[in-house]
Image (tube, rainbow, N blue to C red):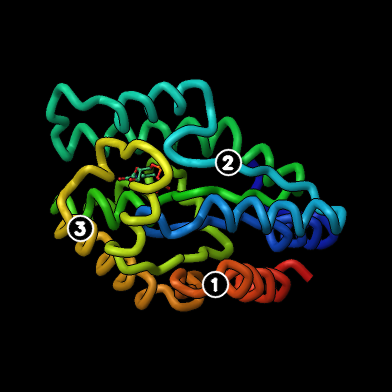
Amino acid sequence: MTLWLEPKKLKQEQQKLQNRRFITFEGGEGAGKTTLIEEISHYLTSRGFEVLKTREPGGTPLGDKIRQLVLENRNEKISPLAELALFLASRAQHVEKVIEPALKQNKIVLCDRFNDSSIAYQGIARNLGKKEVEKACQFFSQNLEPTLTFYLDIDPKIGMSRISKSRTIDRIEQEDFSFHIQVRNAFLKIASENPQRIFVIDASLPKTQVQQMAIKKLCSIIS
Ligand code: TYD
């Protein structure tokens, strides 16, 4: 492998890197990520951008199987480490087979949850260790960092009431209230440590206001 690139090539490579737009969406249960992703995707496609919408766990056939294992398995208690390993396996496959190829094709990738979820849920709320999980995330995602992350902040009381009205709740959503409060505090901590990357939106605001704020922020990085 040669490390030296002629100036023109180097410029092209830098340009390509600058154009990588990997946008992630984080939040507690019922924060409204899915609706926001739909809106943003619609906004971008109508303006001629190529968009890939994806999610974690999932995004690949293997990831979808892992999703079922980790969210639907209610008969066996899954250890926090096993849970982390499953999320990371899904992530590794997703990054290598789907996200990186899409970014190389200059698509804007919109991903529902990524490393910050593992750090908040497994690292902090499940007590596996923030630093340890951060390191594991870097390794399994091959150091892929989002260009921008929207964190939709919601009081778990409001969030949980939104989802329990609309559908049956999964294994992680079933955790007690204090777990969801820990998750929220964890996300707020991660956001405060990464102010350049993470844009916090108050998800209790009306949907249209949340969308406007997100699109305004997004425009500042895509134009
Ligand atoms: P999902 O149905 O996508 O939740 P939501 O609709 O709230 O986004 O389920 C994902 C669940 O998995 C959610 O409870 C968060 C959890 N999760 C982790 O605990 N760690 C992770 O690394 C990821 C990606 C998700």
Residue carrying label 1: 206
Q: Is mark 3 within 8 Å of ligand 1?
A: no
- Label 3 neighbourhood size at 10 Å, few (<14), some (14-19), many (20+)? many
- Mark closest to the chain's N terminus, 1 or 3: 3
Quadrant where the N terminus lies?
top right
Q: Between residue 214 and residue 122, name the one nearer to us.
A: 214
Do residues under tags 3 and 2 come within 8 Å of each other at their CB atoms? Answer: no
- Mark closest to the chain's N terminus, 1 or 2: 2
The spot of residue 97 in percent (x, y) is: 58, 30
Q: Which one is closest to the eye, mark 1 or mark 2?
A: 1
Q: Between residue 36 and residue 133, name the one nearer to us.
A: 36
Left or right of 86: which side holds 26?
A: right
- Label 1 neighbourhood size at 10 Å, few (<14), some (14-19), many (20+)? few
At a point 29% along the width and 62% down the height, the residue shown is: 156
CA–CA distance in space, label 3 to label 2: 25 Å
Ligand 1: quadrant of the figure: top left
Quadrant where the C terminus lies?
bottom right
Residue carrying label 3: 124
- Mark closest to the chain's N terminus, 3 or 2: 2
Residue carrying label 2: 54
Question: Which amino acid, by three-letter code, is at mark 2?
Answer: Thr
Q: Which label sits on residue 24? A: none
Question: Which amino acid, by three-letter code, is at mark 3?
Answer: Ile
Left or right of 197: which side holds 68?
A: left
